[in-house]
């Protein structure tokens, strides 16, 4: 695996990183290696900043309340494992590369400020998953994933997958 971050924070097996209140952890040009447990209060936030790519990896799937991406330019967070977000993913700058992994969004979770320059990508595949209840939705963009759902019927519990895959389009030349 190619590494570009300068440093890392590692939560060892058996250890717990607990954020209480509105505590924030800022990782500047650093990777997050989670082999233990991350417990985050309702307002806790992890912020990834800096001018090189960072990785989220380790033996355990981390669960975040808020995850902010503030990487310079087109630098990104590259997932090496599935993650969960219960609050929101805030896009200030930079990208999240799914790298054939999954982001599970909690029932109240959503993407904030995602656009063409700061977004989720997945050149090796991957997807976001959001489970919600839709009762006669008038025009709902659930979790701000980019698809509007409208129905006069109660749809009940709905699982939404937003997949990411890069496809090369081959040009066919006819003689």
Image (cartoon, rainbow, N blue to C red):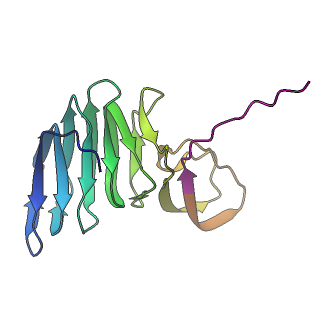
* Residue 99 shows up from this direction: yes
- Relative to residue 116, is residue 28 drawn left or right? left
Main secondary-structure element of the magenta-colored stretch: loop
Screen quadrant of the C terminus: top right
| Nearer the observer, 72 or 52 | 52
Residue at 60% x, 44% y: name it: 147
Q: Position of residue 71 (x, y in %)?
A: 26, 31
Tell me how many marks there are: 0
* Residue 21 shows up from this direction: no
| Nearer the observer, 33 or 84 | 33
Residue at 42% x, 61% y: name it: 107
Verify whether residue 169 appears in magenta. yes
| Nearer the observer, 125 or 161 | 125
- Relative to residue 52, is residue 16 drawn left or right? left
Quarter occupied by residue 60: bottom left
- Relative to residue 137, is residue 100 drawn left or right? left
Q: Position of residue 14 (x, y in %)?
A: 10, 76
Q: Residue furthest front?
A: 175
Quarter occupied by residue 10: bottom left
Residue at 13% x, 39% y: name it: 6
Figure check: 149 above or below 28? below
Q: Position of residue 11 (x, y in %)?
A: 11, 63
| Highlighted magenta segment, given as a residue range | 161-175
Figure check: 97 above or below 135? above
């Amino acid at each position: 695996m190619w590494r570009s971050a300068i440093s890392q924070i590692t939560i060892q097996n058996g250890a717990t990183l607990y954020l209480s209140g509105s505590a924030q952890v800022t990782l500047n040009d650093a990777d997050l290696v989670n082999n233990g447990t991350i417990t985050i209060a309702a307002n806790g936030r992890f912020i990834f900043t800096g001018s090189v790519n960072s990785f989220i990896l380790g033996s355990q799937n981390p669960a975040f309340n808020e995850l902010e991406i503030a990487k310079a330019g087109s630098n990104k967070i590259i997932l090496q494992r599935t993650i969960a977000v219960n609050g929101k993913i805030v896009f200030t700058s930079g990208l999240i590369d799914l790298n054939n992994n999954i982001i599970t969004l909690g029932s109240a979770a959503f993407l904030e400020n995602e656009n063409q320059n700061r977004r989720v990508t997945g050149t090796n595949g991957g997807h976001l998953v959001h489970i919600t209840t839709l009762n006669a939705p008038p025009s709902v963009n659930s979790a701000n994933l980019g698809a509007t759902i409208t129905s006069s019927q109660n749809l009940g519990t709905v699982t939404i997958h937003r997949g990411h895959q890069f496809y090369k389009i081959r040009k066919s030349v006819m003689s």
